Image (cartoon, rainbow, N blue to C red):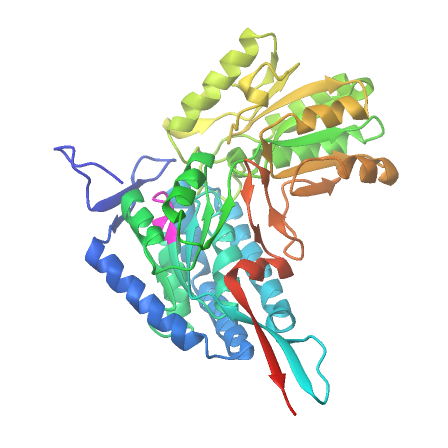
Amino acid sequence: MSKDGDGEPSPVIEVDNPASGDTAARVALLDPEEIALLAGKAEAAARRWSQSTIYERVELCERFLDALESRREEIAQDITAQMGKPISQSRAEIDGMKQRAAYMMSIAPRCLGDVDAGSDASYTRIIERRPVGVVLNIAAWNYPLLIAVNVVVPAVLAGNAVILKHSKRTPLCAMHFERAFREAGAFEGLVNSLAAGHGATAGLIGSDRVSYVAFTGSVEGGRAVSRAAAGRFIDVGLELGGKDPAYVRADADVESTASALAEGAFYNAGQSCCGVERIYVAKPLYADFVEALSQAAAKWEPGNPADPATVLGPMAQAAALLELSAQIDDALAKGARLTVGGNTTTVDKRGRYFESTVIAEATHEMALMTEESFGPVVGVCPVEDDQEALAMMNDSRYGLSASLWTKDLQAASELASHIEAGSVLLNRCDYLDPALPWSGWKDSGVGITLSHLGFDRMTRTRARHFRLA
């Protein structure tokens, strides 16, 4: 929430373009009466939508995707202007969003249908999955479409209404969701965009107007959401921070692994919950790998995000520049070695950018390897063997995803069984497969989105036991 001249909260969110400093958006915050009205419409819509068939819900979501596609370039441009994502990556996010939605639509009839628990001539025993009512989705700015679609489309498919509160960095994205569903034929109140401050949002969570809350953001934000929901007996899904590790075993291919991990670390300017932030490398490969990674990192050059050729955009949040610089200074003071990058910069003397950065000889005495960076900075540490690598990977309060890089499938399987993370990937990173559950361990959160399990918290179970004779 912005502040006006006398220090009082302003009724308007003003978003600056991180590449230029120009105003990218101005969105009015709703007052308490407007929020209550919106919530009431969502409740009414939820009651009506709960009577729809799964096939009607799938058809609505298909039309929603068509409506989004019809405004594809407008949406991509809005993402780039609000948070600085290179336009090519904004366009790719639209494609990824459609793929996730399509998968959840494809499994919805099977996952949400009634289950016969063993009926016969005397009894019918049916397990039903019914919608919870109104789902509040508090979505983050770094992947404003992908994060939101993980909740919005499954919630609608499950028969719920949705209130989508986006980050104050990307409020236009929530408005795109609402408009696309309206253009698809959804009746009033089914999918709603909410522009509100923290206090108003906490009040909505604490009221009896919403039945499930899905939040993506910081650990402290997750705690605030949990406090707001305390005593309500509703589920809260939290996708929080990450400090995702990668382990490069001695049999990995140096060049291809370095290139892939550079992309995992620097894509979206490193502003990914599951981006690679720390790399452990078997000592026989260490020197060659650091050199290859540094060369790959140097190719991620800052540029104007409106240019389709740009791969590294600005930092969405101004405070990130200071935080990244402090982590690097701390690491260098404790014996680490800077191999490439390390500085704030501009493009055409404008914007808030940070160079793609590799820090070698990093240790867990450094904040760079223990605290979330959320920027284009990665630390590299040599390890003696699998057991040391495993211990280092698990030495974190976070547990979102981890990646292994090896040709030895048996070794990878053994390591994966001991890694403390919600997702373990082999020879790839920074990737979500919608057929698999997305979840965090430890301070990375609780709850699940995507896969058939992604419907669980958006439905309640009812048993139907009928005696026939």
Q: Can residue 119 be seen by looking at this rendering?
A: yes
Considering the image in quadrants, where does the N terminus appear?
Answer: top left
**Front-most of residues 427 and 259:** 427
**Front-most of residues 305 and 129:** 129
Where residue 431 appears, as percent x and y from the top left, is 64, 45
Indicate left or right for 38 with 344 as reference. left
- Is residue 400 depicted above or below 121 in this figure? above
Indicate left or right for 239 with 198 as reference. right
Q: Can residue 347 be seen by looking at this rendering?
A: no
Where residue 265 appears, as percent x and y from the top left, is 60, 32
Q: Residue at x 67, y 54 (%)?
A: 436
Q: Residue at x 35, y 39 (%)?
A: 17
Question: Magenta includes 170?
Answer: yes
Q: Specify the quadrant of the image occupied by residue 180.
A: bottom left
Residue extending farthest to the left is: 6
The region drawn magenta spans 165-171
Q: Residue at x 44, y 22 (%)?
A: 323
Residue extending farthest to the bottom is: 469
Where residue 376 appears, as percent x and y from the top left, is 54, 29
Question: Magenta includes 355?
Answer: no
